[in-house]
Image (cartoon, rainbow, N blue to C red):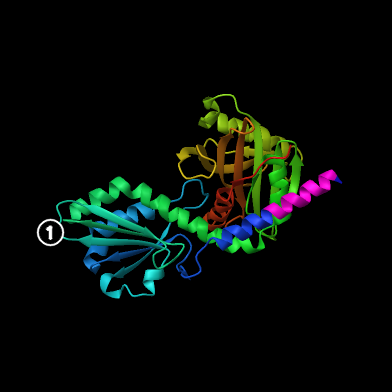
């Protein structure tokens, strides 16, 4: 009876957290518009878009997403000139505006959040010359991309929250002390003491979320070789392949995992790892992205990962949805 009451309380907490999250959003603004990962670029004229400024924007935002089996751009770009920048376009979720003003002494940028719609990020870079504009953009482009990526995740989670699986969120909270916004259709495929595997299987595709932990000992565990070894050990043990003797592994030869530090993950200092998963002793594979952090409350090193499978199809957008789920992490008080 005591355990039943605890689980019921956890479920109620998850539902209340989702309701509060929605309730804190302002209702006075329209929902932002635009395609997934799309950025609207506003230039003063077509020459700016066709020339050096447009080239620098395209070179960065249309670069291929690392860790995908087929080449896919990280973003999509749309373009209008200032003259065509109507109220409809001002509700776009991600806006990058260009201004060349010879009266300026140096390049400057202004930014706003949710000014015309929600969620939204607007960035305007003004510079005295094309050269100054490009140089300023190149120095700060990673920051702008992080801002735009955050908007994408918020937009995805806005659609996930109303139908999120409260029972799975409660199970995660009970085991790990945090919740995730898990969209409908997932089920718990495996639930071990320090490991949980969530699956959503369709006829031709599979979306998977994996959470695992082990004692945190030192900072070397955040280095790429340790992260790969930990992934292979935990997922190789608990995620079997389709044929006898096959199991989950990590591709390290042709697409070495890319490990970076992310600054905006909800758990604090976190290492992101992007790459390709593979099934040892079989021929399956696909992309994954994981986030690893040290939970000071429990002394555990925790990884939240999403991986996707759909042969011969584009995978960037489904993987982005799993990334958004990972970023939905919110800590709760662990059970005693």
Q: Position of residue 241 (x, y in %)?
A: 71, 43
Seen from the viewer's position, the closer of residues 143 and 229 is 143
Determine whether, in the image, residue 107 is placed left or right of residue 97.
left
Name the outermost residue toward the right.
1
Q: Quadrant of residue 42?
A: bottom left
Determine whether the residue tagged by mark 1 lies in a helix, strand or loop. loop
Q: Position of residue 169 (x, y in %)?
A: 69, 51
Q: Is residue 187 visible?
A: no
Look at the image and say whether residue 6 sits in the magenta stretch. yes
Determine whether, in the image, residue 45 is placed left or right of residue 307.
left
The residue under the point 52% across, 62% down is 25
Name the outermost residue toward the left.
103
Q: Position of residue 208 (x, y in %)?
A: 65, 50
Q: Is residue 155 visible?
A: yes
The residue under the point 81% across, 48% down is 5
Determine whether, in the image, residue 179 is placed left or right of residue 32.
right
Q: Is residue 253 above or below residue 160?
A: above
Magenta extent:
2-13
Seen from the viewer's position, the closer of residues 257 and 103 is 103
Mark 1 closeness class: few <14, some 14–19, many ≥20 residues within 10 Å: few
Q: Is residue 176 above or below residue 109?
A: above
Main secondary structure of the magenta stretch: helix
Instruction: Report the residue marked by disc 1.
Output: 103
The residue under the point 62% across, 34% down is 297
Q: Is residue 57 above or below residue 246?
A: below
Look at the image and say whether residue 260 sits in the magenta stretch. no
Q: Is residue 219 above or below residue 159?
A: above
């Amino acid at each position: 009876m005591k355990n039943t009451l605890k689980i019921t309380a956890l479920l109620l907490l998850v539902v209340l957290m989702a309701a509060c999250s929605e309730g804190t959003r302002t209702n006075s603004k329209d929902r932002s518009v635009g395609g997934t990962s799309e950025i609207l670029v506003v230039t003063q004229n077509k020459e700016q878009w066709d020339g050096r400024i447009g080239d620098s924007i395209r070179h960065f935002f249309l670069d291929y997403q690392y860790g995908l089996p087929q080449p896919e751009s990280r973003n999509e770009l749309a373009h209008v000139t200032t003259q065509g920048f109507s109220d409809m376009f001002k509700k776009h979720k991600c806006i990058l505006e260009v201004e060349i003003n010879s009266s300026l002494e140096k390049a400057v940028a202004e930014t706003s959040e949710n000014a015309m719609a929600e969620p939204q990020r607007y960035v305007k870079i003004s510079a005295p010359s094309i050269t100054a504009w490009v140089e300023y953009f190149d120095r700060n482009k990673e920051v702008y991309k992080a801002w735009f990526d955050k908007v994408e995740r918020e937009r995805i989670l806005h659609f996930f929250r109303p139908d999120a699986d409260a029972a799975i969120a409660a199970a995660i909270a009970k085991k790990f002390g945090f919740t995730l916004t898990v969209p409908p259709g997932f089920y718990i495929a495996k639930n071990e003491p320090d490991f949980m595997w969530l699956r959503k299987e369709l006829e031709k595709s599979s979306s998977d979320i994996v959470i695992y932990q082990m004692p945190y000992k030192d900072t070397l565990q955040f280095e790429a070789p340790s992260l790969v070894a930990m992934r292979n050990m935990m997922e190789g043990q608990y995620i079997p392949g389709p044929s006898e003797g096959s199991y989950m592994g990590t591709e390290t030869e042709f697409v070495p995992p890319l490990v970076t530090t992310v600054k905006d993950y909800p758990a604090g200092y976190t290492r992101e790892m992007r790459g390709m998963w593979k099934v040892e002793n079989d021929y399956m594979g696909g992309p994954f992205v994981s986030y690893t952090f040290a939970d000071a409350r429990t002394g555990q090193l925790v990884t939240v990962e999403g991986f996707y499978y759909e042969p011969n199809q584009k995978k960037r957008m489904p993987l982005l949805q799993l990334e958004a789920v990972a970023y939905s992490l919110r800590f709760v008080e662990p059970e005693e």
